[in-house]
Image (spheres, rainbow, N blue to C red):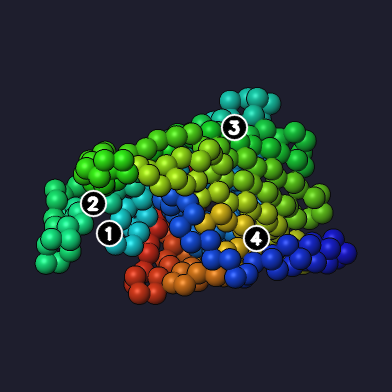
Amino acid sequence: MKKMIIMTVVLVLCFSLYGGENKKIAQTGFQFLSVQSDARAVAMGGAVNSLEMKSGALFFNPATMAHMDEFVSVSFSLNEWIADINHNQLTVALNPAHGQLGVFGLSFQNVDYGELQGTVVNPLAGSGFEYTDKFSPSAQSLGLGYAKAITDRFAIGGQVKWVSQDLGKVTYPSVTTGDTLTKKNDLSLMAYDFGTLFRTGWKSLAFGMSVRHFSRETEFVLEGFQLPLVFTIGASMDLMDLWEIGGIDQSLIVSVDGTHYRSHPEQLLVGLDYTLMNMLSLRAGLVTGNDEENVSYGVGVSRYGFMIDYAYTPFGVFDKVQRFTVRMSL
């Protein structure tokens, strides 16, 4: 119990830093990297930094796939995002030598924004602008990850990824001649994720830490920016470890994450996952500091290494967001 009290005090001290006056507006680009699509994670409010997510860990804390027992883990997620934007994610993890060589992972993310109508500023037009050609913006990321359990309690992991975004063409005035210039508005660069996982050895209590989207500063045309860097610490535990309840196989995981973003104020994430007979999971999550997205709900069904997860998020003026994830482990 002393360890639980110490853990609570540490988390409260760390997470009490959020909620300041610094709004951090328009400091980063490539915001598609901040959108979560994994249905289990979203249903738990994104509080999965210390949970072992197998291949899905590549989009959160890569270190948490280090203890994967299966030879291969695959997940595919569909995210029906706001404004008819679709996010698709694929992850694959391989454990070729029962963890002795570590776990290798591959992640892929694609964003389909649909077709948009282009415009350009024109002070001579009555509306102040005129229409240009229609275009279809897109965004992708492709990552290679690795995780290794250093001991039975401590694991590390990382990922290097290529990220790209194409926003069509942009028309702007030259700062030297005043002429109107047109440039293709696309960009790609490398980014990096790092993470650690520590199993305390007391019950199922675990701590996780991750840094995601670390990269150099870059620019679109004349505007410089950085990727949406985020630092996360978290703790999780199966509360059923505290009580001996016989006759039924069940778990109640509570997970709490604190996040520090470059692009917006800090947030506290809280997630619950109740699983019965290793088959049916009921989930709920809470996110602080969001204007439209605060709570999430979800369900998962698992059998014979195959799982289907669903998450539902009320999204204020944007109605709702739904995610679906299919997983397979062998």
Give the CA separation, mark 3 to mark 2.
33 Å
Whether label 4 touches label 2, CB < 8 Å: no
74 displayed left or right of 136: right
- Res 91 visible: no
Q: Residue at x 62, y 51 (%)?
A: 231
Give the CA separation, mark 4 to mark 1.
30 Å
Q: Residue at x 40, y 47 (%)?
A: 223
Give the labeled residue for mark 2.
114
Secondary structure under badge 2? loop
- Label 2 crowd (10 A; few <14 / some 14-19 / many >=20): few
N-terminal of the pair, mark 4 or mark 2, is 2
Amino acid type at circle 3 is Tyr
Q: Residue at x 44, y 62 (%)?
A: 311
N-terminal of the pair, mark 1 or mark 3, is 1
- In depth, the one of 318 and 129 nearer the eye is 129
- Res 316 visible: yes
Mark seen at residue 258: 4
User: Picture coordinates of residue 62 (x, y %)?
Assistant: 59, 41
Name the quarter where the N terminus is drawn: bottom right
Q: Residue at x 56, y 30 (%)?
A: 104
Secondary structure under badge 3? strand
Give the CA separation, mark 1 to mark 3.
34 Å
N-terminal of the pair, mark 2 or mark 1, is 1
Give the CA separation, mark 4 to mark 3.
24 Å
- Farthest right residue? 2
- In depth, the one of 294 and 271 nearer the eye is 294
Mark seen at residue 84: 1
N-terminal of the pair, mark 4 or mark 3, is 3
Amino acid type at circle 4 is Gly
- Label 3 crowd (10 A; few <14 / some 14-19 / many >=20): many
Give the labeled residue for mark 3.
146
